[in-house]
Amino acid sequence: MTGPRLSPRRAARHARQAVGLTWRAAPGGTFADLLLAVVGGLAPVLVAALTKLVLDKLTTGRGPAVPLAVLGVGLAVVAATSVLLPHLRRYVEAERTRAVSRLVRAHLYAAVQRLGGLARLEDPAFQDRLQAAQQTGHLGPVQLTGSALAGVQSVIVAVGFLGVLLVLSPVVGLLVLVAALPTLWMQLRLNRARAAMILHLEHFQRRDLFFAQLLVGLPAAKEVRLFGLGRFFGDRMLDELRGMHRVEQRLDRREVRAQALLGLLGAGVAGAGVVYVVTRAAAGGLTPGDVAVYLAAVPGVQGALGSLVGQLGAIHQALLLFDHYDEVIRAEPDLPVPAAPRPVPPLRRGIELRDVWFRYSPEHPWVLRGVDLVLPAGSTTALVGLNGAGKSTLVKLLCRFYDPQRGSISWDGVDLREFDPAALRERLGAVFQDFMPYDLSAGENIAVGDLAARDDRARLRAAARHAGIDDALTALPRGYDTLLTRIFFDGPDRDDPRAGVVLSGGQWQRIALARGFLRADRDLLVLDEPSSGLDAEAEHDLHARLRRLRAGRTSLLISHRLNAVRDADSIVVLADGRIAEHGGHDELLAAGGGYARLFTLQARGYREQSATPA
């Protein structure tokens, strides 16, 4: 197993960025931690030196002209400081971690919001990076800074004790230093192997999390219980866990063998040194204080060097973690925005698609193939077609979540690429087929359609009335302030679990429609399968409401149910990414093409259902 590598230039850049982030987030805490690291490195050396002086005073009477009591007080103060330092450092590090976490999250989500389209978010490789950055992005700066400061402390301890040993006995000092070299080499190899193992385990961890969420999460709970999938998914999860543990076990065994050999080597060096020092002390060449300093210095140097190597490994791991965050932060925008975008005017003439071709990547097939289409201002255009015909893709292009690879889409003759995407979207209203149910209150779930209306209860209720959901929301335990989830509670609902409510699919559909009604005054209204979650009666009621809403407005209506689009001003049939038919309902029926065939099939299905006896 070989470890992942970062180029020296990339690693140096990451280190500068990570330290800079830490300093900006918590300058006081970082400086305080540096001081504590320096004091922490000097403390054990000072303890050993003061211990030597006290022992020499007691046994030989030799030493500096300092009263023994003063030396004792100094030793007590330094020892007490050594005890307090770890607690102070943990507190300072925790404060720094919280500050860095806030700053990194703010930068991360700001970078994601700068991605105006969907291309990167729908890219699996970028999603992997993004997920890793969310989970570990803040750990990179924190771990790197913490490990660097711990490394500073280890260097001070090692240099201080080595200096003492070299003064005490150059032979012993050199012997300890030479004995530390195998430890450094082996620890570096083990750290590299552990870094490689962590990346190797990401696959197992993702699969383990996937199966665990299936077993305990709500979305899959019904099918897991109905189909008896608990043991199946549980066994799969345990298989992933066993695979992960096997990889960890192999490295743990390797580390045990290496540490045992290194421990024996260190013990041998230390033992030889003890014999040498004791022999010299017996001959009068060294004092009892010298022996005490040696007994403290040898494990001190070995421990400090081992810790230093460990910190170097942690720094390497921190740089790898930071790499995910850096890739997201430095991601180029997926939609070009002109330096001086044109203002988006009110739609007067219409929207035109001219020879539009689109595919999601060069490896994917073309989804749209030379589409020519006009959405006249003030009229309703219906878009129908089989699954995979390109209807949802066309909606994404109209909202400028993507740009076409060929051709153009114009707004009153101006290419959409000349506008700022955010300004364009301010002119749009939409109800998406895959709308999002948020774990928020009922009022907030509507207000996300236009946050300017968040505190305008009258507007929210008006939108809900248009969508036919106002009565249901008013009847909730806390009305529009009721949380539409049982996952967690907030505010006044915290102590009243009954206030968390789960809506039906049809009710959520109407919530999504209310968001669309909240933006009904926009220039273009996109309705993508607006009645897909409703029963026949509710669907009829809804489309009556939508007809009133669409009157005199520019709208695009997408539906598989052709009865819902028959009153549109024009109907466009999309097939295999091309416009197959275009015209009014009666005209398309008379043409006898694909639209007429689909309409006849659906109508026959309704007639057969009506004729079937109960």
Image (tube, rainbow, N blue to C red):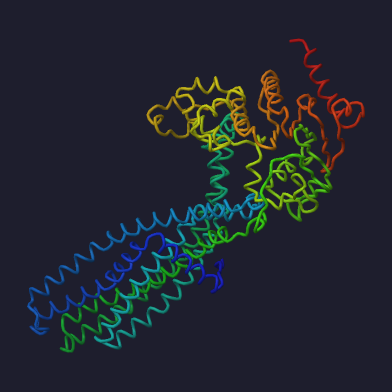
Q: How many marks on residues?
A: 0
Compared across the picture, whether 508 is left or right of 497 comes to right
Which residue in the rendered view is the most extreme toward the top?
613
Which quadrant holds the C terminus?
Answer: top right
Residue 237: image location, x then y, percent: 55, 44
Compared across the picture, whether 82 is left or right of 100 comes to left
Compared across the picture, whether 176 is left or right of 544 comes to left
Give above or below for 513 relative to 167.
above
Residue 410: image location, x then y, percent: 76, 47
| Displayed quadrant of residue 525 | top right
Q: Is residue 525 visible?
A: yes
Residue at 76 percent across and 30 percent down: it is 560
Which quadrant holds the N terminus?
Answer: bottom right
Give above or below for 347 relative to 325.
above
Residue at 33 percent across and 81 percent down: it is 176
**Viewer-side residue, 409 vs 605:** 409
Give above or below for 452 relative to 538.
below
Q: Is residue 484 visible?
A: no
Residue at 24 percent across and 79 percent down: it is 294
**Viewer-side residue, 243 vs 382:** 382
**Viewer-side residue, 408 vs 537:** 408
Residue 349: image location, x then y, percent: 77, 40
Compared across the picture, whether 274 is left or right of 234 comes to left
Residue 559: image location, x then y, percent: 74, 31
| Displayed quadrant of residue 293 | bottom left
**Viewer-side residue, 398 vs 564:** 398
